[in-house]
Amino acid sequence: MQDIIKNLPKLAKDKQNENKKFFKKLKSKPPKDLDYMMQELHDEEFQRTDCLQCANCCKTTGPLFTDKDIERISKFFKMKPQQFINQYLRIDSDNDYVLQSVPCTFLDADNYCMIYDVRPKACREYPHTDRKKFQQISNLTIKNVAICPAAYNIVEEMKKRIK
C-alpha cells in the first residue's frame, strides 16, 4: 500500500489532462445512469480497499468543519464549541474552518480515527465518489485521485465504462 501511496501523485499528474477532458465531456453530457454507476463502482472498490491500510487523506489533507460538525465534536469532547475551535481549528483562505495542521490531530498510530463516530461530514463522505450528480464535483475528484488510491481506481474504471 505504501508504494501505491508514494506513486499516486505522479500517476494522477500523468492522467490529469486526460481526466480534465473526460470530466469536461462528462459534465456536458452525463449518462442517465451515472449516479447508479458511481455507486456501483464505489461499492466494488471499497470491498477491495481498506482505508485503515492507507489513511492518506487523514495524513495529507484536512476536512472542512461545518457548524454542525463543530457542535457534535465539541459535545463529544465535553467542550464548548469555541474551545474546540480555539484548540483544533483555524479559518482558511475560503473562510472555512479547517484543522490547524495535518496529519489530522485525531488520527492514531494505527490509522484509526479517534472521533470516528462523530467525525466531520467531509470525512464521512470522502472521497465523494458515491455522491449524486458526481459530474458536478470534477475539480474535487481530480484532486482526490492524487490522494486516495480508491478514488484513482474508481475514476480509471469509470473512464473504461464511459467512452
Image (cartoon, grey):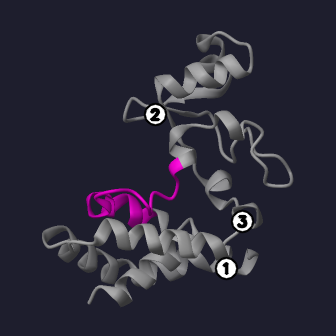
* Residue that mark 3 sits on: 54
Q: Earlier in the sequence, mark 1 or mark 3?
A: 1
Residue closer to the observer: 95 or 144: 144
Alpha-carbon span between mark 1 and mark 3: 9 Å
Quarter assignment of residue 29: bottom left
Membership of 29 in magenta stretch: no
- Residue type (three-letter) at the residue carrying disc 3: Cys
Q: How many marks?
A: 3
Q: Nearer the viewer, residue 145 or 26?
A: 26
Q: In the rendered image, which quarter contains the N terminus?
A: bottom right
Segment tinted magenta in the rendering: 125-143
Mark 1 neighbour class, 10 Å CA radius: few under 14, some 14 to 19, many 20 or more: few
Q: Which residue is mark 2?
A: 92
Q: Is residue 71 above or below residue 1?
A: above
Q: Tell whether label 2 touches label 3 (CB within 8 Å).
A: no
Q: Secondary structure at mark 1?
A: helix
Residue 17 quadrant: bottom left
Q: Which residue is mark 1?
A: 4
